[in-house]
Image (spheres, rainbow, N blue to C red):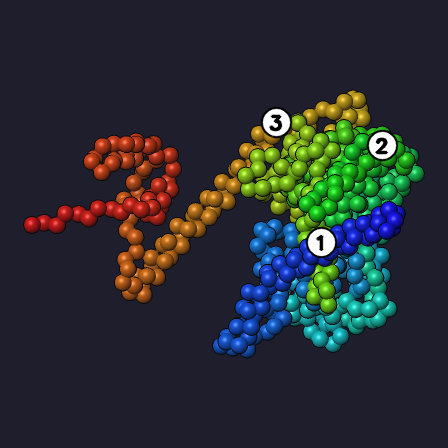
Amino acid sequence: MSKARFAVYAVILAMLSAALVRTTVGLQQRADQYAFFDPLIDAKRLIGERFVDAVDDKKLQQGAINGMVEALNDPYTVFVPAEDRAEFTKELTGEYVGIGAMVQLTDGWLTIVTPLEDSPAFRAGIMAGDRVVEIEGRSTLGLPVDECVRMLVGEPGTQVAVVIERKGVRQPLTITRAAIKTRSVKGFHRERPDGEKWMYLIDPGRRIAYLRITQFTPRVADEVRDALAGVMAEGGIGGLVLDLRWNPGGLLPEAVSIADLFVDSGTLVSTRGRAVPEQVFKAHAGGTLPRFPIAVVLNEQSASASEVLAGALVENDRAIAVGTRSFGKGSVQVVIPLDRGGGELKITEQGYFLPSGRSITRKDDSVQWGVDPTDGFYVPLATPELIDLLRVRREQDILHTGGGDPGQAEERWSDPEWIVTFLKDKQLGAALQAVQKRIDGGEWQPTGRPLEQGKAVVSDELRRARQTYDRIAKELVRLESRIAAMETGAGAPEEAPADLWADDLAIVGGKLRVLDKGGKVIAELDITGEDLERWLLNADVRKPEAPKPD
């Protein structure tokens, strides 16, 4: 045999050996996967054969999938059943086919909160506050919102017959359904008199624009470009307030595209995971807007892609952050269809990291997470202030028709004090004032509280955690009293725990002594709160019985 032929045989033999090894490994992996399902198959068979009632195989299947998902202990990995895919896609993309209106139940009736811009509902003359009393001849009184919405949506070009009630007068309407793309970029106020278009130039004198991004849906970066292009065409941009409060996130590429509008070089964000290689997203000089001061407004509900955008701008020294620390969701999910129409799995695949390399993921033991406000621009809101702000903001979001109220007070949107007083928005007021001072004086000047290296944020979080703890503790005390009363009323043989001391005694400031078995004092503790008795009742202690008389 020639050496050349022997070499060829050797190569073929090596290739066959490698293929055999791969096949063997593959078969072993497949066998391991099948072995994983053996007890599940047995459990399913036993339940089907032995359970007292007939079982629903589909529910068992979905329950098994949900069980695996729940075992991951990840709130962002979810199973979407096939019947829920349409609603899930609608929430993810902001796109659906219907009449285009936000609705709610009021006094049992389906009621219009606001028609959407350029929607069939708006073109049909439907107004905020209108009652939809009938859909296709069926009364909406007492119907769940989801059922009403299912009757309103449908295929594009089809019609739906409704009856609208306004000021006691009912009017039948036939509305042609159309594809609805909810806009994710809003301005600070709607133009008058038509009230449909958003206004973006909040301070005309200084040419300061305001954009609020509600979610990172497909093409939201185009919406941002269009809004800013409109302002620039009217005389340029002197500054920008970018509001990301209550933005839960969305598509990472959209956040990266928006950041790339303002940053001309450097890292914007990076992602990596166990099953995917690291990917670094860089800024590009092409298409970058002229440099102007930017204030990003954040709160505890700014999450995920919102934090990517804010972190990219702040860490590239392109913006300041105003408000409070963001939510802390530093993970990336992908949506993967399951075979044979079995629904979808939204699974956490990667984590993302800010330009500094820091993860913003919030865990139970985290001290630092999210994106912090810039030092000097920490603006927290108390609960009553937050409620007032949301009430006024909701009014601003409503699309009114027929012009504005002639008796409405003068609006001074470029005045931060007016924003705080009439719009109840301290954070927006602080952000606008910061950009104004930066334009007027050339430097950023604090308009909020010092951050103190994050201590202020942690203290605020600690305060809220303690408030939650106190509410739960009070509820536990109430439940203990209720259980004791029910046990007494039911004649339960087991006695309810007795008080260790009278409720009217003042124990705060007193002492608690712990003695060992021989009576030696091993600890003496100061009593600093009112919860001692409740904890002792649930601990391994008991009140000694009084000695019986001889």
User: Which is more toward the observer, 522 or 339?
Assistant: 339
Task: Determine which quarter of the picture holds residue 314.
Answer: top right
First reached walking from the N terminus: tag 2 or tag 1: 1
Q: Name which residue type carries label 1.
A: Val
Front of the two marks 2 and 1: 1
Task: Determine which quarter of the picture holds residue 172.
Answer: bottom right
Residue that carries the numbered disc 3 in the rendered image: 453
Q: Dots 3 and 2: beta carbons under 8 Å?
A: no
Residue that carries the numbered disc 1 in the rendered image: 21
Left or right: 298 with respect to 509? right
First reached walking from the N terminus: tag 1 or tag 3: 1
Q: Position of residue 141 (x, y in %)?
A: 65, 70
Q: Name which residue type carries label 2.
A: Asp
Left or right: 488 with respect to 197? left
Q: Which mark is residue 264?
A: 2
Label 2: how many Cα within 10 Å (few below 14, some 14–19, many 20+): many
Label 3: how many Cα within 10 Å (few below 14, some 14–19, many 20+): few
Label 1: how many Cα within 10 Å (few below 14, some 14–19, many 20+): few
For the point 22% across and 32% down, the residue is 520
